[in-house]
Image (cartoon, grey):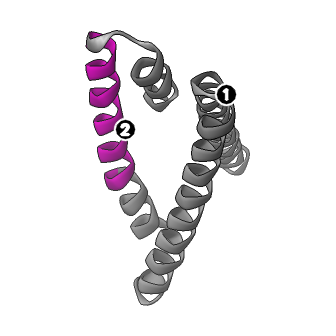
Amino acid sequence: MIEIFTAPFIFLGSTGMVIAGMVLWGISIGTQESILKAAISDQVSEDRRARAFGLFNTLFGLFWFIGSALIGLLYDRWGVAPLVAFSVLSQTGALLVFLSLFLGKKNQKSAVAG
């Protein structure tokens, strides 16, 4: 969730906000790295983990590249504001997808228990 604020802080803020944005970015990356790998380990059987990690890292890298290329294009053609808007909208969309999956799974468990 804090990832939503990194682009506005880094690209639109003062020196203090840029530093705060970099700190938020570091927290976000550190959290993603630990939580996502733990989630994959919990969800995938031991004999399929190598394939799951390989697939995850491939897709993660591919979409990181696509997003970075798009951000570079936005910056090059239209400046900082569209870059920040794209970053905030894509992170907000990712948060909504995560919440819907999380809440859906939570509701599924409740229905099974009830």
Q: Nearest the camera: 4 or 107?
A: 4
User: Disc 2 on helix, strand or loop?
Assistant: helix
Horizontal and vertical percent position of residue 62:
57, 67
Task: Say whether residue 3 is left or right of residue 103.
Answer: left
10 Å neighbourhood of mark 2: few (<14), some, or many (≥20)? some
Q: Quadrant of the C terminus?
A: top right
Q: Nearest the camera: 26 or 69?
A: 69
Q: Quadrant of residue 71?
A: top right
Horizontal and vertical percent position of residue 84:
58, 26
1 vs 2, front mark:
1
Horizontal and vertical percent position of residue 44:
49, 74
The amino acid at mark 1 is: Pro
- Which region of the structure is painted magenta? 16-34
Of mark 1 and mark 2, the one earlier in the sequence is: 2
Task: Say whether residue 14 is left or right of residue 4.
Answer: left
Magenta stretch: residue 90 in it?
A: no
Magenta span: chief secondary structure: helix
Query: Mark 2 sits on what residue?
Result: 28
Magenta stretch: residue 28 in it?
A: yes
Task: Say whether residue 35 is left or right of residue 59.
Answer: left
At 66% from the left and 33% from the top, the residue drawn is 86
Query: Mark 1 sits on what residue?
Result: 82
The amino acid at mark 2 is: Ser
Question: Residue 72: which numbered mark, if any?
Answer: none
User: Is residue 63 at least partly visible in the picture?
Assistant: yes
